[in-house]
Image (tube, rainbow, N blue to C red):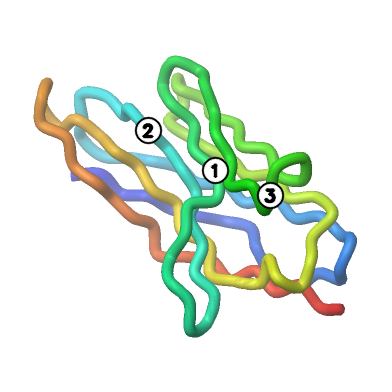
Amino acid sequence: QVQLVESGGGLVQAGGSLRLSCAASGTFFSIDVMAWYRQAPGKQRELVAVAFSGGSTNYADSVKGRFTISRDNAKNTVALQMNSLKPEDTAVYYCNAVAQRTPGYKYNYWGQGTQVTVSS
């Protein structure tokens, strides 16, 4: 089992910055993917940024150039630095991990979510 604990989030004015952090713990063979998703009221959950174990990253078009995902494989942590925040970034942000509990068996895990509110 993998537990994901998030921290960060809160209320910020438009143009400001926030940093989200997520730490994975538990028993697993490896964590292949760590990512951040978000879900705004009345909308579907969407992928914000993803970091693969090999070092590559990918971002939603809406956050490219403003958000940066960083991952520490040794510590099993992932962070999301969010700059130039906009009101439309307001959402609950979820940490996600795809982990192999045993080699070849991948499972999807979610954090509890953290609220990010950007005021105009």
Residue at far front of view: 61
Give coordinates of residue 16: x percent, y percent: 87, 60
Quadrant containing the C terminus is bottom right
Tell me the tag on residue 33. 2
Marks 3/1 in contact by CB < 8 Å: the verdict is: yes
Marks 2/1 in contact by CB < 8 Å: the verdict is: no
Above or below: residue 74 compared with residue 69: above
Quadrant containing the N terminus is top left
Q: Tell me the crowding category of disc 1: few under 14, some 14 to 19, or many 20 or more residues within 10 angstroms, Cα based.
A: many
Residue shown at 60%/31% (left/top)?
70
Give coordinates of residue 48: x percent, y percent: 55, 50
Alpha carbons under labels 3 and 1: distance apart: 8 Å
Query: Which amino acid type is shown beneath numbered disc 1?
Result: Ala
Alpha carbons under labels 2 and 1: distance apart: 11 Å
- Residue that numbered label 1 is attached to: 49
Between disc 3 and disc 2, whose residue precedes? 2
Between disc 2 and disc 1, whose residue precedes? 2
Q: Nearer the viewer, residue 22 or 50?
A: 50
Q: Secondary structure at mark 2?
A: strand
Q: Secondary structure at mark 3?
A: loop
Query: Which amino acid type is shown beneath numbered disc 3?
Result: Val
Query: Which amino acid type is shown beneath numbered disc 2?
Result: Val
Alpha carbons under labels 3 and 2: distance apart: 19 Å
Residue at far bottom of view: 42
Counting labels gives 3
Tell me the tag on residue 63. 3
Residue shown at 67%/53% (left/top)?
62
